[in-house]
Structure formats: C-alpha cells, structure tokens
Amino acid sequence: MDLIHPAEAGEVVDAVRSGRRLLPVGGRRHMARRGAVEVDAELWTSALDRLVAYDPAEMLCVVQAGMRLGELRAALADGGQEWPTDEPDDATVGGVIAAGVDPVRRLRVGTLRDSVVEMEVVLGDGRLVTSGARVVKNVSGFDVHRLLTGSLGTLGVITQVALKVRPLPAARRTLVTREGGLALGRRLLDAVRQPAAVLAEPDRIVVHLEGWPAEVAEQEASVRALAACEATEEPPVPGVDTFPGSPIVVEAGIVPSRLEGTLAGLDAYRALSGVGLTWIPCRDAASAAEIAARGEAAVTCRAETPEPSHRERTALEERIRVTCDPGDTFAGRT
C-alpha cells in the first residue's frame, strides 16, 4: 500500500484528485472506530504540523491538522493555556477532531465541537474549502466544520483548524473512591459543585476536580464527606483505555436518566456521570450488538474484528457523503 505524506494543503488536493481511494491517517489512535476498509493509499497528515498562529490574548490558536498534541500543549503552556482534550500526546489535532473524541472533563470544559471555530478541509472532489471564522460571533454560511468533527475522515481531509483555547487551571486534583456504582456517582455529581469529571465504575468512582485552589479544596471536601477516597496523580482517561484486555469495547451514548437501567447486570463498565457516555467491554460481536441496542447510540472504540463498527447509513448521511465525497474517495463506509 502506498503512503502519502503531504506537507502542504495543495499536496493533499493533488492526492485527492489522483483518483486513488484514500484513508486519511493522523496519529493512528482512533482507527478501530472506523473499521476495516479497502484503500489504495494511506494519506498521512503528520507532516502538516506547523503552529500557524497563536494569540494568547484572543485565546485562539491556528494549527495544521497533523500537529501532535504534545507539541501543541507545550506551545499553549507558554501562554498559560490549553486546548481542552484528554487524548495522549502522540495523537494529532486533526485525528482527535475527525474522531470526535470529547474530553473526559466535558462537564467543566465543554465539548470538542465547540472548541473548533474554523476548519480548512479538502473534500472528496478535491475542493479546498474553509468553514467558520476566527471570530466569536460568526453566523454566516453553513457549519461544515461541525459536520466534519466526528466524521472519521469519511468526508474530507482536515488540513488546518482554528481552536478556542482556555486558561490552564490553577489547581487540579483526582480522587478515587473505595466503593463504586452508578448511585454513588450520581450522589457525588449532585454534591460537588462543577466537577470536571465523575467516572463511575462498579467498584470505584474517579472524580477529577480543577479550578482555583480554594475551589478545588471545597470540591474535595464535598467528595470526602460522601465517600472514603484517595488522591492520585493519574489524570482521568477515556474509558476505552480502562479495558486493555477486552477484544471489543463499545462506547454508548445513553440518556443519563436511563443509565442505571441500561447497565443493570453488567460486571464492568465506565460511565461518565451527568453525560451518559459509557464504555463497556464485550467478549464478542454478538454481546456488543446487544449492548449497543440498549443505548441511544453506540460505536466501537476498539475491536479485533471490524464487524461491530459497520452499519447502514441513513438517507441523510448518504446525502451528506455524496455531497462532500461523490466518488467515495475516502472509503466512506462507517
């Protein structure tokens, strides 16, 4: 298989117009979400790695999509700021956006989609288009950049993005309780003012706190008033990394009010309280399909075989794909 390493957006355009079927690749951190596809070449964005612009006063940075998160974090830390994602340092900015991976801390920092204010992307017919604007108040045109967030590279190749950044928290604290369960997770969520994350597991709860030192101290006291716990230096991680030995991990979006009923009887899970995002290890495709049917939506985070990732596109999804990628250049099966 050919490997293409464009260093400029124009080279991405040339690759897309070459007629080959392409698989856009960033840091290879989220490939299992998409499943196996047949392509002629992999188009790597890792050479598109420049910091184009950064204005701490405006809380805005512009980067090429192949920049590694570790490099972006170092650059933003010099300005006392961060792009709020919890993905590892070797992931790329464009890969995280294409995979649509929301931060575990979304109770505090919001969703990934809301942090992307402008996007430059090469669509399947070779058009280089820009969506959004580097201003807060922008209501013109269609939000193509929001559509591309979470599209898994099936609609276009992200080449550059403008990101809203935020101040680094002055203090952080992660607490792990000695007992678990969804009921305790719900009580902690109700008792602690503005936690960054409350991740419930059957035998423990991971509570992440951040903010000003006095605020974090108050939050910690609220946690300790409800449950015995210990502090840890390990930051909260997405649930898929909690089950390294499982062949399949399902990520399910479940209405929070239905969470306990949906997860009843399961021996292992990791649920983001207040959000409903849940990770569940499964032994095979059949059990994954059964779990997926319980939630509002589900995708496979990691699988040894691709079957759980595949489903038929809806009519709306098909119309969007045909508009953005009429020739199925990006192997758009999802």
Image: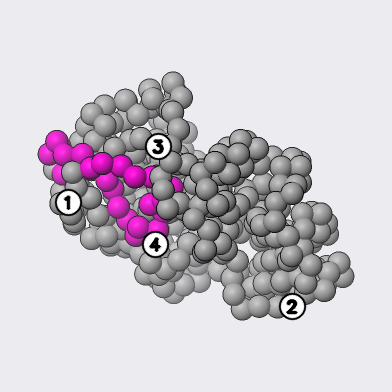
Q: CA distance from mark 1 to mark 4?
A: 22 Å
Q: Nearer the viewer, mark 4 or mark 3?
A: 3
Question: Is disc 3 in contact with disc 1, using a CB cutoff of under 8 Å?
Answer: no
Question: Is disc 4 in contact with disc 3, using a CB cutoff of under 8 Å?
Answer: no
Q: Mark 4 sits on what residue? A: 91
Q: Which residues are magenta?
A: 15-39
Q: CA distance from mark 2 to mark 3?
A: 41 Å
Q: Which numbered disc flags the more N-terminal residue, 2 or 1?
A: 1
- The type of residue carrying mark 1 is Met
Secondary structure beneath disc 3? Answer: loop
Name the disc covering residue 230, or none.
2
Q: Which numbered disc flags the more N-terminal residue, 2 or 3?
A: 2
Q: Which numbered disc flags the more N-terminal residue, 3 or 1?
A: 1
Point out residue 59 in the picture as x, y percentages from the top left corner: 48, 59
Name the disc covering residue 1, or none.
1
Neighbours of disc 3 within 10 Å: few (<14), some (14-19), many (20+): some
Q: Mark 3 sits on what residue? A: 334
